[in-house]
Amino acid sequence: MNKLRIALLGFGTVGKGIYQTIEVQQARLQQLTGKQVEIAAIVVKSLKNHKNYNGHAKLTTDFQEVLGDKNIDLVMEAIVGKEPAFTYLQQSIQQGMHVVTANKEMFAQHGQELKKLAEKHCVQIGFEATTAGGIPVIATIRQLLQVNRVRKIQAILNGTSNYILTEMRMKQLSFSQALKKAQELGYAEANPANDIDGRDAYFKAVILCQLLFGSKADKARFKQTGIRDISMSFLDEQEAAGKRVKHLVTIAETEDGIYCDISPAALEPGHPLYAVEGVDNAVHLETDILGELTLTGPGAGALPTASAMIEDFCTIIGRPNAYSAHEELASIH
Amino acid sequence: MNKLRIALLGFGTVGKGIYQTIEVQQARLQQLTGKQVEIAAIVVKSLKNHKNYNGHAKLTTDFQEVLGDKNIDLVMEAIVGKEPAFTYLQQSIQQGMHVVTANKEMFAQHGQELKKLAEKHCVQIGFEATTAGGIPVIATIRQLLQVNRVRKIQAILNGTSNYILTEMRMKQLSFSQALKKAQELGYAEANPANDIDGRDAYFKAVILCQLLFGSKADKARFKQTGIRDISMSFLDEQEAAGKRVKHLVTIAETEDGIYCDISPAALEPGHPLYAVEGVDNAVHLETDILGELTLTGPGAGALPTASAMIEDFCTIIGRPNAYSAHEELASIH
């Protein structure tokens, strides 16, 4: 039986989730692709951190080994930070490999460039996992864009912020108490700045803007405020008025151009994102033909992210040449 | 420029929504498919009802004209009731045409047969519009099934029932008052039995069961109760206990086989479908890898249905040979 061979870049929690899911779902993936799906190599920063590893795939610190292997079909990247992720994906594409990434920071900055490069080299890029974790928001927007124009998006894209705001309101915790709890549970990093200052949501908002508006997104105006300065008394006031405070991303195209506001907002009970609590993410889409649609689900986590990345893999293997037509949609707004 | 030629079966509110949307979105569809998209013929029951029609497409009562036209690529069916819809689609498939349907009653009974026939004749069937209107639930389940097993579905699939229950609770109307209002607003038919006795939800539940479980769905056990006997005092009691009553579809695979329960249920405030009000539909999926996902949106209406059908058209034209692999997934549970 022919094999589909994957190289995995990064072997932290997400990388391990991918590895495990591909092992567990081997029968399903074989049935779908008609081939055995194998992780051929895993590129890590240091072998020292993986002394207990005893899997089949080769562990290496040398990305050039992956690049030199002509039998690798697709690269899955689950590294944190822009580099070396960007350089690795650029080189993989140039070698004719498809790529799938979960790296929002890298893709917010270099996504458009990588999409163009992929088109030039006739390969695909999957980036479902960069935005709203396991919620298939990229695939859904692509599907809707075939027929609809998306007028406005409102979204909760940072699960850590939503968790902190939910805990503060429901358990009467201070911001720092709720943050500490999020860190203890692994929802927030030791350095939580990316989450609580809105940077993580900003990366995802940029990726959505580029998906919706293509190169026009370059001129979008962004406003970014985190939840660091939210006090319990402010939440109490809003609750007394029947409202819940959420860290809201709003993207819309107006006569003055595209704007994207990322900031705390007090939502009324009838608002589609009012009931989204804890670490969940949600995306509310307003479209011209279909009307309004809301997707709610896990915004992060190793397995939801792995699921999104392997769905990308299946889509790419299922229709290797369908990418460009979809991306071009943004240009006919 | 080459053309993609569509025959439209039925020209009621949904048929007109399709016609209008294809006209309005012509530029977008051309960009996507690389071809001009044209409705070549519209098959109606009687010409008398369409005296004011002055569109480009030929209006005919003779389906054989469509069958005899070798240049028709795809048939879109928006007829009510099983016949002649089933016969028309069967014959279209045998002539090598792709088909897209919004007909839940027909597809619940004949869907599996049509899927097999389509596979034999190497054409595609789109049925996104049969279930939950504009919510892309079929596409999302297909995408998730690539990696996930869906353990359980809970859904609100009949917008009319949900509207009636919402009105009864919020405005203290009796069942018959709320039903009358739904009829006045066009949400319920003059004969509302399909909606209020749970038959409409049953058709959609059958289609979801078949998508999830393939031929195993033939043995699923169904239990069906409508909302006809729900009293205002029952809703008040539940509301006093903090609960809301919804007409709930539950599909799950247990050790005893597949069961599907369609009946009113009192939901707690934390339930993912608690806040789904009015004519909206929603589908909550529990999966093994990704976790839980909820989709909420318009469950009916001419434009949401048209959007779903044209999305099907785009998917089929974009990847004409990808159908079978997806459908086969159900068999590896």
Image: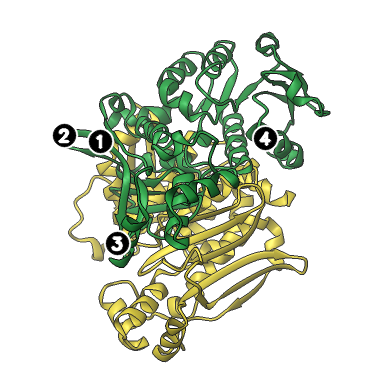
Chain colours: A yellow, B green
In the displayed structure, A154 sits above or below B211; it is: below
Q: Which quarter of the image is occupied by the N terminus of chain A?
A: top left
Q: Report whether A201 appears left or right of A27.
A: right
- Secondary structure of the residue carrying numbered label 3: helix
- Residue on which the image places disc 1: B259
Tell which of A321 and A38 is nearer to you: A321
Mark 3 or mark 1, earlier in chain:
3
Tell which of A160 and A307 is nearer to you: A160
- Secondary structure of the residue carrying numbered label 4: helix
Query: What is the crowding at mark 2: few (fewer than 14 residues within 10 Å), some, or many (at least 20)?
Result: few
Mark 3 or mark 4, earlier in chain:
4
Query: What is the crowding at mark 1: few (fewer than 14 residues within 10 Å), some, or many (at least 20)?
Result: some
Query: Do pointers 3 and 4 mark residues of a single chain?
Result: yes
Query: What is the crowding at mark 3: few (fewer than 14 residues within 10 Å), some, or many (at least 20)?
Result: few
For residue A99, say whether it is visible: no
Find the distance from the CA under tag 1 to the CA under tag 2: 8 Å
Mark 4 or mark 1, earlier in chain:
4
Find the distance from the CA under tag 3 to the CA under tag 4: 44 Å
- Residue on which the image places disc 3: B237
Q: Position of residue B208 (x, y in %)?
A: 39, 35
Q: Amino acid at mark 4?
A: Ile
Cβ atoms at labels 1 and 2 below 8 Å apart:
yes
Q: Amino acid at mark 2?
A: Asp
Find the distance from the CA under tag 4 to the CA under tag 1: 35 Å
- Residue on which the image places disc 2: B256
- Residue on which the image places disc 4: B18
Q: Nearer the viewer, mark 3 or mark 1?
A: 3
